[in-house]
């Protein structure tokens, strides 16, 4: 007869530890459920971000929860910017720490974080086990262990949400990691939804104003035609009578100049409204830019250097050449105005292909793309200004120098082609506009 099997006895401490683990697991699952419900019921994710961090922070029992946005700076370096933070009582906040604003992943020694986030993987564990180059900035914040989940808005990496344990090291169970990943996914979905709604509203405003501008332009053009014809008849009649003296000639020329300026405004309104019959065809972007170089140099003047570069073998895009030229001219004029004394303007054309299961630069979807970079060394823009630059009739220029239609026209043309626009800028560091067009073969 076999002796009965005996299980290994457990101590009260083991029971307490297991019970504590189960309680924390249930708290995290409940917190994630409340957080995702909150996100789904809120129209604007920023309105609930702080509450979201509090819910998940209290559920996990950590010292600090935060959100970083990931974006490129003016030098196109991928950086992290802290935007929201919750801290437990007695924990030092880090939201105002300047060292946590604009952290360059590669230069700061966090390249493996960025690579993991791009793959959709979290970073977690005890700081003592992290690579030496990562430890100083984490130890400075008194972090003993952490869990950081990437936040993806659709296909592109938008940011990250992190959980810091500062009181004692915290071991993360797989079920907890997966549960907090759900919270990050729900948050990313809210960000993507708001981005799409904002883009749709922008397009609707552009289309509505375009229709209005087109109607106004046609009516105004009729008035200009009558005024121009009357001016020509007046000049001919005065000349025929021999009474067209110098003073009268100057007045007529001033009137003709004003009519010409009005006609130019009409053309800009019609271009903005897109109410003209375009003739799209396959265009070699670099050749089109090179053909426009004399005009671009004339616009920029002698004080601003112009550089034009292209990668070999750039494919064509299907676009009306006039639209392409108008897009570049608008950006060049803006760059010139941002460099009133001197500077440098670079136009760079390259191309790339993004696989089906990956996301391209600036969040462009899979496909083959031609990218045009327009980079200047001008005064740059603040975040508040750069967020509004594509709004119709928004301008920071004097009333006699800008109508606020230039970048709105660029937005309408690029998005009308199924393309994308991204901007990197900051005060004193210039601006870079990146235009993405689908290639002819990628349509």
Image: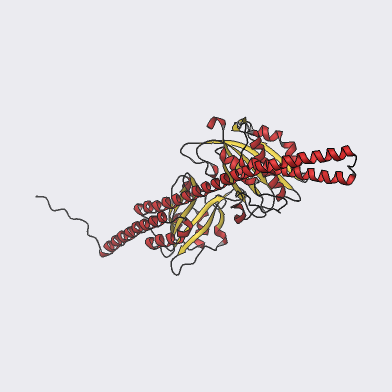
| Colour option used | secondary structure
Is residue 152 visible to the viewer in this orientation of the structure? yes
Specify the quadrant of the image occupied by residue 59.
Answer: bottom left
Q: Residue 145 in the image: x percent, y percent? A: 43, 58
Task: Please tell me which residue lies in front, 19 or 316.
Answer: 316
Q: Position of residue 357 (x, y in %)?
A: 46, 38
Work out whether residue 297 or residue 21 is closer to the camera in this orientation and state it.
297
Q: Is residue 8 left or right of residue 356?
A: left
Where is residue 136? Give x, y as percent.
52, 59
How many numbered discs? 0
Question: Is 380 on the left or on the right of 17, as rendered?
Answer: right
Q: Is residue 53 left or right of residue 262?
A: left
Residue 146 lies, with reference to residue 319, above or below; the image says below
Residue 150 x/y as whole percent: 46, 50
Which residue: 70% across, 43% down? 223
Q: Is residue 430 above or below residue 62?
A: above
Can you say whether 223 is above or below 19 in the image? above
Residue 346, visible in the rendered structure: no
Q: Which residue lies most toward the bottom here?
A: 90
Q: Kindly identify the residue that appears in the image at 34 percent across and 52 percent down.
A: 175
What residue appears at the point 62 percent right and 43 percent down from the top-left corner? Answer: 215
Front in this rendered view, residue 283 or 394? 394
């Amino acid at each position: 007869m076999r002796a009965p099997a005996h299980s290994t006895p457990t101590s009260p401490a083991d029971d307490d530890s297991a019970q504590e683990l189960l309680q924390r697991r249930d708290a995290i699952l409940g917190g994630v459920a409340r957080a995702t419900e909150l996100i789904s019921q809120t129209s604007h994710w920023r309105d609930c971000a702080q509450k979201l961090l509090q819910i998940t922070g209290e559920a996990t029992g950590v010292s600090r929860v935060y959100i970083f946005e990931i974006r490129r700076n003016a030098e196109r370096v991928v950086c992290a910017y802290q935007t929201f933070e919750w801290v437990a009582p007695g924990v030092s906040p880090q939201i105002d720490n300047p060292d946590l604003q604009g952290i360059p992943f590669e230069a700061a020694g966090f390249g493996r974080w960025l690579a993991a986030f791009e793959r959709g993987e979290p970073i977690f564990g005890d700081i003592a086990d992290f690579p030496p180059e990562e430890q100083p900035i984490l130890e400075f914040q008194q972090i003993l262990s952490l869990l950081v989940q990437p936040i993806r808005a659709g296909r592109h990496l938008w940011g990250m949400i992190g959980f810091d344990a500062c009181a004692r090291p915290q071991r993360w169970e797989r079920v907890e990691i997966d549960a907090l990943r759900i919270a990050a996914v729900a948050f990313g979905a809210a960000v993507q939804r708001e981005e799409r709604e904002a883009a749709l509203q922008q397009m609707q405003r552009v289309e509505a104003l375009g229709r209005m501008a087109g109607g106004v332009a046609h009516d105004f053009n009729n008035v200009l035609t009558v005024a121009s014809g009357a001016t020509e008849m007046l000049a001919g009649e005065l000349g025929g009578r021999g009474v067209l003296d110098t003073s009268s000639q100057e007045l007529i020329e001033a009137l003709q100049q004003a009519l010409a300026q009005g006609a130019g405004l009409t053309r800009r309104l019609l271009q903005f409204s897109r109410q003209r019959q375009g003739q799209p065809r396959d265009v070699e972007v670099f050749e089109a830019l090179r053909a426009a170089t004399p005009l671009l140099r004339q616009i920029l003047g002698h004080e601003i250097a112009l550089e034009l570069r292209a990668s070999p073998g750039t494919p064509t895009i299907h676009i009306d050449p006039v639209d392409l030229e108008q897009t570049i001219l608008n950006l060049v004029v803006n760059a010139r105005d941002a460099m009133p004394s001197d500077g440098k303007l670079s136009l760079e054309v390259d191309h790339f292909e993004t696989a089906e299961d990956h996301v391209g630069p600036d969040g462009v979807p899979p496909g083959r793309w031609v990218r045009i970079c327009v980079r200047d060394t001008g005064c740059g823009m603040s975040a508040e200004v750069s967020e509004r630059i594509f709004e119709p009739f928004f301008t920071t220029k004097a009333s006699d120098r800008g109508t606020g239609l230039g970048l709105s026209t660029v937005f309408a043309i690029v998005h009308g082609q199924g393309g994308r626009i991204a901007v990197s800028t900051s005060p004193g560091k210039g601006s870079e506009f990146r235009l993405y067009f689908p290639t002819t073969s990628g349509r």
